[in-house]
Amino acid sequence: MVIPIIFVAHWQLSIFTQTFFLHRYGAHKQFTMSKGWEKFFHLLTYVAQGSSFLSARAYAILHRMHHAYSDTEKDPHSPTNATNALSMMLDTKHTYDDFAYRRVEPEARFEGDYPDWPALDRFSQMWVTRLAWVAFYIALYAKFATAPWMWALLPFHFIMGPTHGAIVNWCGHKYGYRNYDNPDVSRNTLIFDIVTLGELFQNNHHRFPLSPNFGARWFEIDPGYLAIKVLDAVGIIKLKKGQKMKYPADRFSEAA
């Protein structure tokens, strides 16, 4: 049963780098780290996401737009603007590509203060590089798959990053409960979230976008935040004190 272990490991490592590095650090700067550790986690994010690696710069810009325009016509990924999760993410891809390939300049308020490694972005976005990762995943399955059903998991490795994005942005704005009456449709999909390491506490996060803890009530356990606390305790990152700001006073909102 090696394949299920590989799948779960890839899923968890990919979502960890996405929530820890791209989201909480890159888009919101909920904590700080040295330039050396920033390069390490940037490279780890590339290795974890492989063929579906998301540019830290493009992710940050897109996510800041999402907070500023949450569930309005200008939101780059909201279920209120799409008939299904696939169409939502395809629309998102067009906007993301504009920033990832630096074809379009974003609004000034969404720019800056994010990890930027142009050489890695260019390398990761080459089709030969992406196809090399696809070949690597196929080789793993050819080596370790012992039952036909296991091959059904293979395509998810190709698009692991966007898969996580689709789950969070579709389910987190469509299903679940609300702790706060935010001016959007964000929801907490799960009461404890080990699937996306806290990302599905969307209602809490949209209320307190700069808080590194996405859980708000006693039963809402955010595994991503627990990892952040450990990394802070050992000195790899440094949490900002009192980092809890209510919507809509986010620095990327209209009031910024």
Image (tube, rainbow, N blue to C red):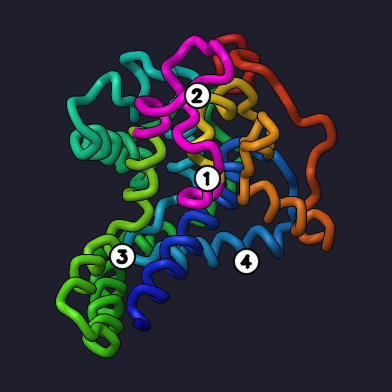
- Disc 2 and disc 3: Cα gap in Å? 28 Å
* CB atoms of marks 3 and 1 within 8 Å: no
User: Depth-wise, is mark 3 or mark 1 nearer the camera?
Assistant: 1
- Which residue is at the far bottom? 143
Near mark 2 (Cα within 10 A), the count class, few <14, some 14-19 or many ≥20, is: many
Range drawn in magenta: 171-197
The amino acid at mark 2 is His
Mark earlier in primary sequence (2, 1):
2
- Disc 4 and disc 1: Cα gap in Å? 26 Å
* CB atoms of marks 2 and 3 within 8 Å: no
Residue occupied by mark 1: 193
Secondary-structure class at tag 4: helix
User: Depth-wise, is mark 2 or mark 3 nearer the camera?
Assistant: 3
Q: Give residue 157's mark.
A: 3
The amino acid at mark 4 is Phe
Mark earlier in primary sequence (2, 3):
2
Label the magenta part by its dominant secondary structure: loop
